[in-house]
Image (cartoon, rainbow, N blue to C red):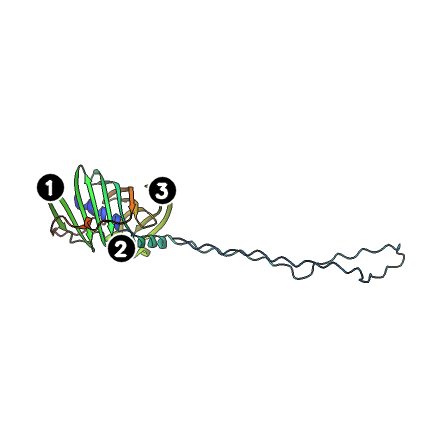
């Protein structure tokens, strides 16, 4: 399998990045003032001729004051759009610091590969360690530049990437209004409540379903494309908190990776 394809998928997954206000509380209707009973000294109307002499009944007394008006129900605020919710969560990850472990399955070019990944994020630095069939490789994204490193026989080799690590995902985050973003039912992944979204667009090859924690940490990603294949990525463990800065030190001086035309739309 082309390693660059896998690399681009993993970086795209991490680079993607709501709450509505409560309705106004309705005030109860005002209680009408108590009625004052009619005075016994009030003059009774004259009895008509032929009356039996019995005391006529007083007419039914009308309530005093203006009847209480019913307060109309407060208008419910419009629901926060899926695009706005996605933007809010995507922005949260910029302030997050965490270490997470994932299980990932990639199907491409007629082959299926399962891998375990460990990802770390601290400010503008990111590290992804990938284990495939016992071989460990590391991807670093430091201040916007991507590096791929491997160690063979105790010797580490690193390459810098000349192409953007994740064109499509960055475009979605920067211009979400250009894409069709839908809210999906929430889930619990790795014992963490997750908000989920569906993403599609005319210039975004394939369709993507993603889920994030409240901190903006990716917990689930399912990407399907007729041309590039399929990727399913699920978090198995997430630790939010301080990450050691030394984890982002490259194990070797990077060399230039041969120029490419992109990574299949990821």
Q: Residue at x 35, y 54 (%)?
A: 83
Residue carrying label 1: 152
Q: How many marks?
A: 3
Which element is circle 3 on? strand
Q: Which dot, 2 or 1, sits closer to the camera? A: 1
Residue 186 % position (x, y): 37, 45
Residue count near mark 1 (Cα–Cα under 10 Å), binned few <14, some 14–19, many ≥20: few
- Residue 1 visible? The answer is no
Between the residue at mark 3 and the residue at mark 2, the CA separation in whole angstroms equals 27 Å
Residue carrying label 3: 188
Which badge, 1 or 3, is on the more N-terminal residue? 1
Judge from the rendering whether residue 185 lies leftward or rightward of residue 265; answer left or right.
right
* Quarter of the N terminus within the rendering: top left
- Compared with 128, 33 (above or below) is below
Which badge, 3 or 2, is on the more N-terminal residue? 2
Residue count near mark 2 (Cα–Cα under 10 Å), binned few <14, some 14–19, many ≥20: some
Residue 38 % position (x, y): 76, 59
- Residue 159 visible? The answer is yes
| Tag shown at residue 171 | 2
């Amino acid at each position: 399998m082309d390693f660059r394809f896998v690399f681009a998928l993993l970086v795209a997954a991490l680079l993607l990045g709501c709450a509505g206000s409560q309705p106004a509380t309705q005030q109860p209707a005002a209680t009408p003032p108590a009625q004052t009973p009619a005075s016994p000294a009030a003059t009774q109307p004259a009895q008509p001729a032929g009356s039996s002499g019995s005391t006529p009944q007083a007419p039914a007394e009308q309530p005093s004051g203006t009847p209480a008006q019913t307060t109309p129900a407060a208008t419910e605020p419009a629901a926060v759009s899926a695009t706005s919710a996605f933007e809010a969560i995507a922005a949260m990850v910029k302030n997050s610091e965490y270490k997470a472990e994932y299980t990932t399955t990639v199907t491409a070019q007629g082959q299926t590969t399962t891998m375990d990944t460990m990802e770390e994020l601290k400010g503008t630095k990111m590290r992804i360690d990938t284990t495939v069939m016992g071989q460990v490789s590391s991807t670093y994204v430091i201040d916007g530049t991507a590096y791929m490193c491997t160690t063979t026989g105790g010797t580490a080799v690193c390459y810098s990437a000349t192409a953007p690590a994740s064109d499509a995902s960055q475009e979605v985050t920067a211009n979400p209004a250009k894409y069709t973003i839908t809210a999906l039912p929430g889930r619990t992944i790795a014992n963490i409540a997750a908000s989920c979204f569906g993403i599609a667009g005319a210039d975004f090859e394939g369709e993507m379903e993603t889920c994030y924690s409240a901190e903006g940490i990716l917990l689930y990603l399912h990407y399907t494309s007729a041309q590039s294949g399929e990727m399913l990525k699920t978090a198995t463990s997430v630790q939010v908190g301080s990450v050691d800065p030394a984890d982002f030190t490259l194990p070797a001086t990077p060399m230039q990776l041969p120029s490419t035309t992109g990574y299949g739309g990821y």
